[in-house]
Structure formats: C-alpha cells, structure tokens
C-alpha cells in the first residue's frame, strides 16, 4: 500500500497470487475514512482488479510456488542483461508444419478463430507459449515462444475478442510488451488479423487516439528484428500499427487467405456504392453487391499486394516457421542503432 505500490508498477514483470496478493495506494481503512467507501482488500486492489482491469499485474499465480515457476519461465526467454543476446536453444531444427494448420482460419472472412492455435503451431515442441497480460486487453495477444530455438516475442490479433479490433487496453498492452522485448533484444513477430481501431464517441472520450499512439510509437522505436505475417485481414491503421510495410519490418509475408486494404469489402462497397445500390430492386441489389465485393476482394488479396511490393512474399502456412527461422538467423547479428540522448516524447 501507499508509495510502495509504485514499486511493482515500475517493474518489468509483476506476478500476483490469487486471493492473497493485493496492491493499492490506500488500504480499506483509509478508503473508508476518506471516502466512506467500504471495500475489502481484494475488491480494492486484488489480483482480479490488477490482472483484468488496471493492467498493473502481468501474470496471476495459483500459489507462491506457482508464481516462482512463472518467474522461471519468464526469465528463460531473457538474456542475463540487456547487452547480451537472448538465449537460443541449439538443436531445435524445424520442418514444415503439419496440415492441421491449414484448417485454423475459417473460410468465412468475418468468422472468429483462436489465434492461440496458430501460435501453438509456431512454437517449438516443449514448453507452451507464455502469454503476458493475458487477462487484459484481450483483442491483442502478447507473449513469448521459441522458434528454431530462438526466443521470440509475439504480438497477435485475437478475433475471439471484439473481432480483434484495437482499443485502449490492447494498445497500451502491446506498447508495453514491444518496449519490453526491445529493451532486451528479443525479436518481435506480429501476426495480423486486424480490422482496425475501435471507433465511436465512447472510445474517443476515453482517449483512443492517445492510447493507440503509444503502440505506434513503440513499434517505431523498436530496433530489434521485426517480422510480420498477415494471417487473414489487415485493414486500415490496424495494418499500419501492427508493423506494416511502412515500419520496414525485416520480413513481411502473407498467407494466401490474407486481405490488405483500407477496410473490408462490405464497408467499402457501402461507402462507394451505397446510394446507387439502395436505388436498385432487392434481387438486383444483392447481385450487384456480390459482384462489387468480389471485385474488391480480387484487388486487395495477398497476391495483388505482393505484385505491388506491398509485402515480401505469399507463403504456404506450413512453411511459416522455416521462413521465420531463416530471418532470425540472418538478423541475429543485426546492428541496432543506439538511441541518442534526445528522444521523442512518448505519448503518455
């Protein structure tokens, strides 16, 4: 409590034990005395509050022993200090992924799927991926895996939550994770299935522009090797902030299912042809809309993007790990520029 509560907030990693861990600037007696509010220690600043609401805690543990095990797993991805490379496990050669990876992404463009399945396929056999701030900002997944023995930080869209749209919490979460990986030289992998940023009066009042800029700033400042795979959709500013071509990733590729555009086909056709379509009879309207949407999708698919040099390659999903490991090997000795004393203003 009190000023000591800021110590965890300044830490790289905070693990809270369920039902016993608590953090607050003022305990229940002080809160009741000052505000007349009666709350328990857990209601005020327990593990659920800080893991899913405030974002102060990054992991929750079932017990003290479980917390120590989480800390061990966390540290296994990191170097001993920021001036040495992250540890690599030798002898972890990978071949093509099995055919089951081909069935993860649904045929229906708007149907959600669990990006954790993709991440599990990319991860080397052995320990499961370690997800960071998993209960906070759920439309973005952040965590660590190993590919070919390399330690890799993953920033991935999660369409099971809000369709994968970027909002305040997910932007702040991603910004923190990107900054953490960059500080310790851990390469970053972005997996895109992003429809863009959340819009509307509520999120504007809550500062979506300012919070989204935090993620934008973090990506722009990161000097570690960066790789981007467009798994399905990559629309608008979401594509850009998830390490799109403009940020010059070391490698950017797409699966054949990918669409790269300002927005989805349905929204684009509504804006461009809405008035014209509304004047048509229902049957003709449906026919025309389908033709327009099909034409739009043909122009924004992965092969069109590759033809315009918007991406480096269109790859078979089964070959994803082999391509990424090759990039990691080539960028292993990448020279990272030192940030000068003068720097940009972080958009806090």
Image (cartoon, helix red, strand yellow):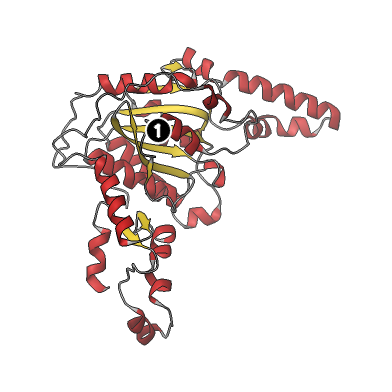
Q: Is residue 48 above or below residue 42?
A: above
In the shown orientation, is residue 74 left or right of residue 321?
left
Helix or strand or loop: what does disc 1 sit on?
Answer: strand
Between 276 and 21, the one lying in front of the other is: 21
Q: Residue at x 50, y 43 (%)?
A: 197
Q: Which residue is mark 1?
A: 190
Q: Is residue 258 visible?
A: no
Relative depth, front residue between 218 and 56: 56
The crowding category of the residue bearing disc 1, from other C-alpha atoms within 10 Å (few below 14, some 14 to 19, many at least 20), is many
Q: Is residue 316 left or right of residue 285?
A: left
Looking at the picture, how far across and down is residue 74, in whole percent? Answer: 28, 46
The number of numbered discs placed on residues in the rendered structure image is: 1
How far from the left and from the top, in percent, is residue 181?
27, 40
Q: Nearer the viewer, residue 347 or 26?
A: 26
Write the residue at 29% across / 24% down: 328
Question: Percent x, y for residue 76?
Answer: 25, 41
Q: Residue at x 18, y 25 (%)?
A: 335
Query: From this viewpoint, is residue 94 visible?
Result: yes
Quarter that holds the N terminus: bottom left
**Quadrant of residue 92 in the image?**
top left
- Rendered view: 40 above or below 187: below
């Amino acid at each position: 409590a009190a000023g000591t509560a800021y110590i965890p907030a300044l830490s790289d990693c905070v693990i809270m034990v369920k039902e016993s861990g608590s953090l607050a600037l003022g305990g229940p007696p002080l809160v009741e005395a000052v505000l007349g509010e009666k709350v328990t220690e857990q209601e005020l600043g327990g593990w659920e509050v800080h893991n899913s609401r405030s974002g102060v805690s990054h992991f929750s543990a079932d017990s003290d022993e479980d917390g120590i095990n989480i800390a061990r797993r966390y540290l296994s991805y990191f170097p001993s200090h920021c001036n040495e490379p992250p540890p690599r496990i030798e002898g972890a050669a990978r071949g093509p992924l099995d055919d089951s990876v081909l069935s993860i992404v649904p045929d229906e463009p708007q149907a959600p799927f669990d990006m954790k399945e993709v991440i599990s396929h990319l991860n080397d056999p052995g320990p499961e991926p370690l997800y960071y701030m998993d209960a906070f900002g759920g439309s973005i997944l952040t965590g660590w895996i190993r590919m070919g023995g390399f330690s890799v930080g993953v920033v991935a869209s999660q369409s099971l939550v809000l369709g994968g749209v970027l909002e305040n919490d997910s932007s702040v979460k991603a910004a923190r994770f990107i900054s953490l990986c960059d500080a310790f030289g851990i390469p970053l992998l972005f997996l895109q299935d992003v429809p863009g940023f959340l819009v509307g009066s509520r999120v504007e009042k809550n500062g979506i522009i300012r919070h989204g800029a935090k993620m934008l700033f973090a990506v722009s400042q990161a000097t570690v090797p960066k790789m981007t795979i467009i798994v399905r959709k990559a629309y608008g500013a979401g594509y850009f902030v998830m390490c799109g071509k403009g940020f010059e990733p070391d490698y950017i590729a797409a699966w054949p299912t990918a669409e790269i555009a300002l927005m989805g086909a349905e929204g684009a056709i509504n804006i461009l042809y809405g008035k014209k379509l509304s004047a048509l009879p229902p049957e003709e309207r449906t026919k025309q809309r389908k033709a327009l949407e099909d034409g739009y999708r043909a122009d924004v698919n992965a092969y069109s993007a590759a033809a315009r040099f918007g991406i480096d390659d269109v790859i078979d999903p089964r070959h994803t790990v082999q391509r990424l490991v090759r990039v990691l090997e080539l960028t292993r000795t990448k020279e990272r520029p030192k940030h000068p004393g003068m720097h940009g203003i972080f958009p806090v």
